[in-house]
Amino acid sequence: MNNKGIYSVLFVCTGNICRSPTADGVLRKLVADAGLAHAIEVDSAGTYDYHVGEAPDRRAQQHARKRGYDLSALVARQIHPADFSRFDLILAMDNSHMAVLRRHCPADELPRLQMFMSFARRHRIDEVPDPYYGGAEGFEQVLDMVEDACAAILEHAREQLAQCEQARRGG
């Protein structure tokens, strides 16, 4: 947590146009609805530069919009070395993303890395499948998984904020 008491979460997938921006948009809405936009920062990035500067995949946007999530302001970017110290929690969407993150992450920052689906409660699967080459059902499946895990990530962030506040107050 930074010195301003802000907890930060970064979602990471391959090109930052499907899975990670979907998680970004879902958590941003949950955070805003909880009145915590001032205390929880949310972002997303890709392990590769395939789509830097592009909006999320139109299908990801369309399916997210049907559930009340707006991804239209998000722009794809690649993970940056500074992200490893900037974000409190860096969540990989699949094992290949985790492998890339581990290769580039400084050893003292490794505890920040976790698998996104480790937060899921209803879905017992390790990875979020890439919907890019499939049909509508893939984007819906990703949204189901993302909504599940993001609810728990919000709870986790709230706990971290409470612990920080308690420590700040000395008790």
Image: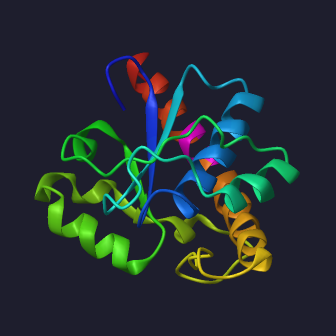
Kindly identify the residue that appears in the image at 54 percent across and 24 percent down: 39
Above or below, 65 relative to 31: below
Q: Is residue 148 left or right of residue 160?
A: right
Relative vertical location of residue 116 with respect to residue 81 in this rendering, above or below: below
Residue 161 falls left or right of residue 63: left
Q: Position of residue 8 (x, y in %)?
A: 44, 37
Q: Residue furthest right?
A: 66
Look at the image and give the residue range highlighted in magenta: 154-158
The C terminus lies in which quarter of the figure? top left
In the figure, 105 relative to 100: above or below?
A: above
Of residue 108 and residue 20, the one placed in the foreground of this image is 20
Q: Check residue 60 for magenta coloring.
A: no
Give the residue at x 40% y 25%: 167
Residue name at image x 64 percent, y 26 percent: 36
Residue 110, given in percent of the width and then of the height, sits at 23, 59
The verdict on residue 155 being magenta is yes
